[in-house]
Amino acid sequence: MSADCLFCKIAAREIPATLVHETDRVVAFRDISPQAPVHVVVIPKEHHADLSALTAADPALAGELLAAVAHVARAEDLEHGFRTVFNTGADGGQTVFHVHAHLLGGRGLAWPPG
Ligand code: AMP
Ligand code: ZN
């Protein structure tokens, strides 16, 4: 656990969140500021700053993270499709530096995003 990391604290149940899925190494919870009818954040419980750090340290965990995204998409009935986003670094719009996938769905999503 990384001190003062919001998502480490959510994974450790020190900060409340609405959990929708959990495995031994991954947890998924609803985004506090949803950008679509379904907006779930999927994280590894272990702290890695971003996608690059995660894949360098533990590519199998990156695979488990993606499997959890697909699991939640099925559970949330997103059979018409969904979007998965990894904001990475300042230019990527990342604000919480604990790697996470955004799972967005439940409406048609424009591409490119507005
Ligand atoms: P990013 O900008 O890609 O780093 O995404 C961080 C996401 O975390 C944003 O979509 C926030 O709305 C979300 N977020 C911040 N605090 C919380 C929280 N306490 N519970 C759930 N989601 C949060
Ligand atoms: Zn963390």
Image (cartoon, helix red, strand yellow):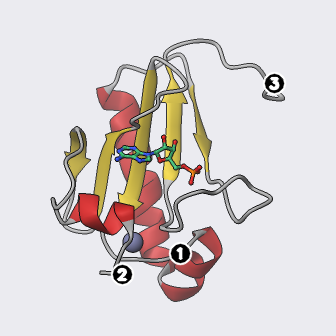
Front-most of 81 and 1?
1
Assign the N terminus to one quadrant of the image: bottom left
Q: Residue at image x 53%, y 30%?
A: 104
- Decide if ligand 2 comes within 8 Å of the CB at mark 2: yes
Q: Which mark is residue 49?
A: 1
Does 71 appear above or below 63?
above
Q: Measuring 67% from the left and 19% from the top, which residue is drawn there?
A: 109
The residue identified by callout 2 is 2
Please report whichever mark, 3 or 1, sits nearer to the chain's N-terminal start.
Answer: 1
Foreground of the two, 84 or 67 = 84
Residue 33 vs residue 52: left or right?
left
Amino acid under disc 1:
Ala
Residue 19 lies in what quarter of the image?
A: top left
Look at the numbered disc 3 and say if its residue's Cβ is closer than 8 Å to ligand 1.
no
Q: Residue furthest front?
A: 4
Mark 3 highlights which residue?
Answer: 114
Q: Which residue is pictured at 36% across the width and 74% down the height?
A: 4
Q: Circle 1: is it few (<14), some (14-19), or many (20+) Cα within 10 Å? A: some
What distance separates the C-alpha of mark 1 from that of mark 2?
10 Å
Decide: is 112 above or below 5.
Answer: above
Q: Quadrant of residue 30?
A: top left
Q: Is mark 3 on a helix, strand or loop?
A: loop
